[in-house]
């Protein structure tokens, strides 16, 4: 079965305005639908920049990123914001939650910005609130008393699971996780990743997992070194091609 | 739009402590600014209505403001007096409807004593052409009767029937006291909010009499037949103490004074005021000054103007302090909110949504501050209104916004909005630079 490309990067070059060297130079990267890709990169290697590029927050100087058949270059910045809201769910390293929103409001936040995700979440359960509850209980947060707590009183692990529920609500096609486990203790790290996989099992979801940590590589079907994607590391390009 | 408002409200609620402080400081400056303006307005109105219905005030040749100050406000001395002859002659002028003689210079426990006649209570008007009214007693000053203003009664604890002694000159410590000639209080006036409240009114004839007696009879301190006569008269007067003022009762002790500080005139025809003024200013027998009180009151108000301007400026400075406080609160929150902005960006918020989120904050704080300030100000005014009107005689209109106040409110609102632009723009720039990842 030939899988369709979900994310296509071609001839991408990016350089921050205040830096002399090109930070990212990726001739080609194709991530297929339903693929779980682990991108390993040390700090400063441009992981965050790549995530910002994928989200359409920043634009590359050269090249293009095509997501779900849509070239980001053809979209205005406001359209890219909308596109990101509709198709990408994010989980960050820590402090993932908006402190003044309740747990449920944090989970349903993407539905406030994207009518697509609002509709899909509503279609999945009867209301977005029910869908949020369903996702939270899937992730092991079903205690009523816990849900009433301010998000700032949750443990880091609980916060990360709320963040995961937020990423999943409204079934975005892509989940981008940026070091989501590095603030968790060792036992929780692996189970968190398994929770992510569990949640997308029945769906057509692509996961891009970015971390500096190499320990989780075995958990993913595909993995890649960010440095190996770079054009100036011609020797390791083949490695990337192994995907 | 709606989702951002929704977020902004929750964010404000989350930081209610600091936000409440900002709101309080804005409210305080609103209370101060509008309060000062409201009081300035009422004081102006009350000041302008110190005297009304009097067409001309005449005194010896002097400046118009000093004549007004001495005759109406009882501040300062008139250097020169007007002769009684001139007063009589002018009073008989066919254009003149009524005249009130005024004699100042004595005091009672630092309250000025005004020598006048019963005509004063008939013709002197203040505010919206109101006559003086008695809170107690009858408005008679002939004989040794005295009518005291509301403040005099309140401060000295006097009531009808009490006696008071007039001192020559101003001030408590004056050693020349006419203590053989006590006046009896016939009436206490209702508060007017004018200098009348601080004035003791007595008969100009009795005042002339005690002066004549003092200066003419060296041994008056030892034995004073006049005083006895007055005392006898007083007893007789007591019999009709509660009767209405008897204008036919003209058995004044001491007869007429030789000089006056000045006098008030009412004319038959309003349009003859200028003509009469010129006539008096060029009076041949004696150098006189005649002023139209309304015109001179305006002149005097212009002297006071810088004070009210200063008050307004101070209020605005307080407003600026409040704005700086609000700005500081928002600015300090910006850094800790960078991660929040990144989260919002990740779920699809546009940079302009971030801008809006911050601007709504300053706008809400300002708006709520204004509303709270106006409510508190009016509650204060409601509480203070009876006190102010009884103490100062100034009636404060409560739910009556003038144009000045409305423009102040819009200035504050606009100021709050403009000040919000700065942190909003910073946050907007941060969110562009940070994107989804913050290196804090």
Image (cartoon, coloured by chain):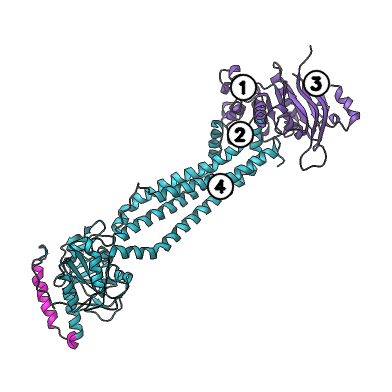
Q: Colour of chain A?
A: purple
Of the numbered discs in the image, which one, if any, rests on residue A146? Answer: none
Residue B299: % across, % down: 35, 65
Q: Nearer the viewer, mark 1 or mark 3?
A: 1
Whether callout 2 and callout 1 share a subunit is answered yes
Task: Please identify the quarter of the rendering in which residue B44 is found.
Answer: bottom left
Whole-number angstrom distance, CA of label 3 to CA of label 2 = 33 Å
Q: Is residue B97 visible?
A: no
Whether callout 3 and callout 2 share a subunit is answered yes
Residue at the farthest bottom position: B218
Whole-number angstrom distance, CA of label 1 to CA of label 4 = 36 Å
On what subunit does the disc labeled 1 rest?
A: A
Q: Is residue A192 above or below residue B181?
A: above
Query: Which SS does the magenta portion mostly show?
Result: helix
Whole-number angstrom distance, CA of label 2 to CA of label 1 = 26 Å
The answer to whether residue B234 is left or right of residue B2 is: left
- Crowding near the residue tagged with mark 2, few <14, some 14–19, many ≥20 C-alpha atoms within 10 Å: many
- The quarter of the picture where the N terminus of chain B appears is top right
Q: Is residue B246 above or below residue A224?
A: below
Q: Nearer the viewer, mark 2 or mark 1?
A: 1
Name the residue that disc number 1 marks: A116
The residue range painted magenta reads B216-240
- Crowding near the residue tagged with mark 1, few <14, some 14–19, many ≥20 C-alpha atoms within 10 Å: some
Name the residue that disc number 3 marks: A221
Name the residue that disc number 2 marks: A151
- Crowding near the residue tagged with mark 3, few <14, some 14–19, many ≥20 C-alpha atoms within 10 Å: few
What is the letter of the cyan chain?
B
Whole-number angstrom distance, CA of label 2 to CA of label 4 = 31 Å
Residue B339: % across, % down: 66, 38
- The quarter of the picture where the C terminus of chain B appears is top right
Say whether disc 3 or disc 2 marks the residue closer to the N-terminus. 2
Q: Is residue B195 above or below residue A50?
A: below
């Amino acid at each position: 079965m030939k899988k369709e490309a979900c994310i296509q990067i071609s001839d991408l070059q990016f350089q921050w305005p205040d830096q002399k060297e090109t930070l990212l130079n990726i001739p080609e990267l194709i991530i297929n639908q339903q693929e779980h890709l682990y991108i390993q990169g040390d700090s400063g290697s441009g992981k965050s920049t790549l995530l910002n590029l994928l989200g359409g927050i920043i634009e590359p100087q050269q090249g293009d990123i095509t997501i779900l058949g849509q070239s980001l270059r053809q979209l205005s910045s406001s359209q890219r914001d909308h596109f990101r809201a509709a198709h990408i769910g994010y989980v960050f390293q820590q402090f993932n939650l908006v402190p003044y929103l309740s747990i449920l409001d944090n989970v349903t936040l993407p539905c406030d910005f994207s009518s697509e995700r609002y509709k899909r979440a509503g279609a999945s359960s009867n209301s977005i609130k029910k869908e949020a509850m369903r996702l939270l209980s899937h992730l092991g947060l079903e205690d009523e008393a816990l849900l009433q707590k301010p998000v700032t009183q949750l443990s880091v692990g609980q916060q990360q699971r709320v963040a995961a529920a937020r990423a999943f609500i409204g079934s975005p096609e892509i989940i981008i996780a940026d070091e989501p486990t590095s603030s968790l203790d060792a036992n929780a790290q692996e189970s968190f990743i398994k929770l992510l996989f569990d949640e997308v099992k029945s769906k057509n979801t692509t996961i891009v997992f970015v971390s500096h940590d190499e320990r989780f590589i075995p958990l993913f079907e595909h993995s890649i070194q960010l440095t190996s994607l770079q054009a100036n590391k011609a020797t390791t390009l083949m490695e990337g091609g192994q995907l | 739009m709606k989702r951002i408002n929704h977020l902004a409200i929750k964010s404000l609620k989350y930081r209610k402590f600091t936000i409440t402080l900002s709101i309080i400081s804005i409210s305080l400056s609103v209370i101060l600014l509008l309060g000062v303006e409201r009081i300035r307005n009422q004081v102006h109105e009350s000041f302008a209505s110190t005297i009304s219905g009097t067409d001309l005030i005449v005194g010896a040749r002097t400046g118009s403001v000093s004549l007004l100050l001495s005759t109406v406000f009882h501040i300062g001395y008139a250097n020169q007096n007007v002769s009684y002859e001139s007063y009589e002659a002018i009073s008989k002028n066919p254009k003149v409807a009524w005249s009130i003689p005024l004699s100042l210079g004595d005091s009672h426990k630092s309250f000025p004593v005004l020598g006048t006649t019963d005509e004063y209570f008939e013709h002197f008007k203040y505010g919206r052409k109101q006559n003086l009214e008695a809170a107690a007693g009858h408005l008679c000053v002939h004989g040794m009767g005295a009518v005291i203003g509301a403040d005099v009664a309140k401060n000295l604890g006097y009531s009808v029937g009490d006696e008071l002694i007039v001192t020559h000159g101003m001030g408590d410590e004056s050693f020349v006291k006419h203590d053989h000639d006590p006046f009896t209080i016939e009436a206490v006036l209702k508060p007017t909010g004018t200098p009348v409240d601080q004035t003791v009114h007595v008969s100009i004839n009795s005042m002339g009499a005690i002066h004549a007696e003092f200066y003419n009879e060296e041994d008056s301190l030892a034995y004073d037949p006049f005083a006895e006569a007055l005392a006898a008269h007083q007893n007789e007067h007591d019999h009709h103490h509660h009767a209405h003022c008897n204008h036919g009762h003209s058995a004044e002790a001491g007869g007429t004074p030789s000089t006056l500080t000045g006098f008030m005139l009412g004319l038959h025809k309003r349009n003859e005021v200028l003509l009469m003024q010129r006539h008096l200013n060029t009076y041949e027998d004696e150098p006189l000054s005649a002023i139209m009180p309304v015109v001179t009151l305006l002149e005097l108000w212009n002297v006071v103007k810088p004070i009210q301007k200063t008050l307004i400026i101070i209020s605005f400075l307080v407003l600026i302090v409040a704005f700086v406080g609000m700005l500081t609160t928002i600015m300090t929150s910006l850094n800790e909110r960078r991660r929040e902005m990144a989260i919002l960006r990740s779920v699809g918020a546009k940079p302009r949504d971030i801008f809006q989120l911050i601007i709504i904050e300053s706008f809400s704080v300002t708006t709520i501050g204004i509303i709270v300030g106006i409510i508190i100000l009016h509650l204060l005014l409601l509480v203070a209104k009876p006190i102010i009107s009884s103490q100062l005689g100034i009636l404060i209109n409560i739910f009556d916004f003038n144009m000045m106040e409305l423009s102040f409110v819009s200035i504050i609102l606009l100021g709050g909005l403009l000040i919000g632009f700065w942190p909003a723009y910073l946050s907007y720039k941060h969110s562009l630079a940070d994107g989804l990842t913050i290196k804090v």
